[in-house]
Each structure stands twice: as structure tokens, then as C-alpha cells.
Amino acid sequence: MIKAVTFLGVALLSLSAQDVFSADKNGRYWIYGVGSQNCETYLEARNNGGLSEISYKNWVSGYLTSSNRSSEDTYNLLGETNFQGALSWIDMYCGKNPKNTVYMAVANLSAVYYPKRKKTK
């Protein structure tokens, strides 16, 4: 009986430690804010500065913060790179992929930086 309870506890714990991604039955999900805008619009905001650029920076910082919180074994997804370095990476990505969304740019940044992430403080 103890083995069965221990096994059940370990099984439940392992399920709760896995990354959870949600979407509808077709794999689609809603993107809030400026993340749904295309890279071309993002680059215009970066070049013009002001409130528009701040909106993009805030969206990116929110995405990264959420990734830090929800990614297993992650303290800082960017590792040794600072936020300005991440924005430069997104600028480069968007320059090469102007029709992609900002969400796609930041998702790709996350995939590239994940192996280099800082796991603890």
C-alpha cells in the first residue's frame, strides 16, 4: 500500500512539474497587445521612439517575465544578456522577417536563449 501511495505521489508531482501550454483544439490561442503586430510596425516604433516604442518594450518585458516564471529551472531566460541585448536581437530578427509578428520574434528569442538561461540567482 505504501508503494502505491508513494508511486501515485511521485506521478502527480511529475505531472505538476511539466510545462503547460494551452490552446484551442486547433492549436490556436489569442495574443494580447502589441505582440500581435507585425515586425515592420515594431521597427517603426523602435525608430520613432516615444510611447509606441514603450508599449513594445513593456510587452516584451512582460513576456520575458512570464517565461521566467513559467519555464522550468529558469531564473532569467536571457542568461547573461541584458534587456537591451534582447531588444537588439528582436530588432535583427524583425529586420529579416518584417511580416512576422512581434510574438513570433520574442518566441524565437526565447527558444534561442533558453539553453543559455540562468537557472538560479
Image (tube, rainbow, N blue to C red):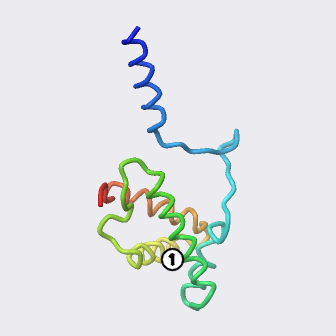
Q: Which percent across, then down, holds residue 108?
A: 47, 60
Q: Which percent across, then down, holds residue 105?
A: 52, 66
Number of on-image labels = 1
Q: Which percent across, then down, holds residue 45?
A: 60, 85
Dot 1 surroundings within 10 Å: few (below 14), some, or many (20 or more)?
Answer: some
Q: Is residue 1 above or below residue 117?
A: above
Residue at image location 56% in from the left, 81% down from the top: 43
Q: Is residue 90 above or below residue 63?
A: below
- Quadrant location of the C terminus in the rendered image: bottom left
The answer to which quarter of the image holds residue 9 is: top left
Q: Which percent across, then down, holds residue 35?
A: 62, 67
Q: Where is mark 1, residue-wise?
A: 95
Q: Is residue 20 left or right of residue 51?
A: left
- Quadrant location of the N terminus in the rendered image: top left
Along the line of sight, the residue nearer the viewer: 60 or 89:
60
Amino acid at circle 1: Gly
Along the line of sight, the residue nearer the viewer: 70 or 32:
70
The answer to which quarter of the image holds residue 59 is: bottom right
Q: Is residue 39 above or below residue 64?
A: below
As drawn, which residue projects farthest toward the front? Answer: 2
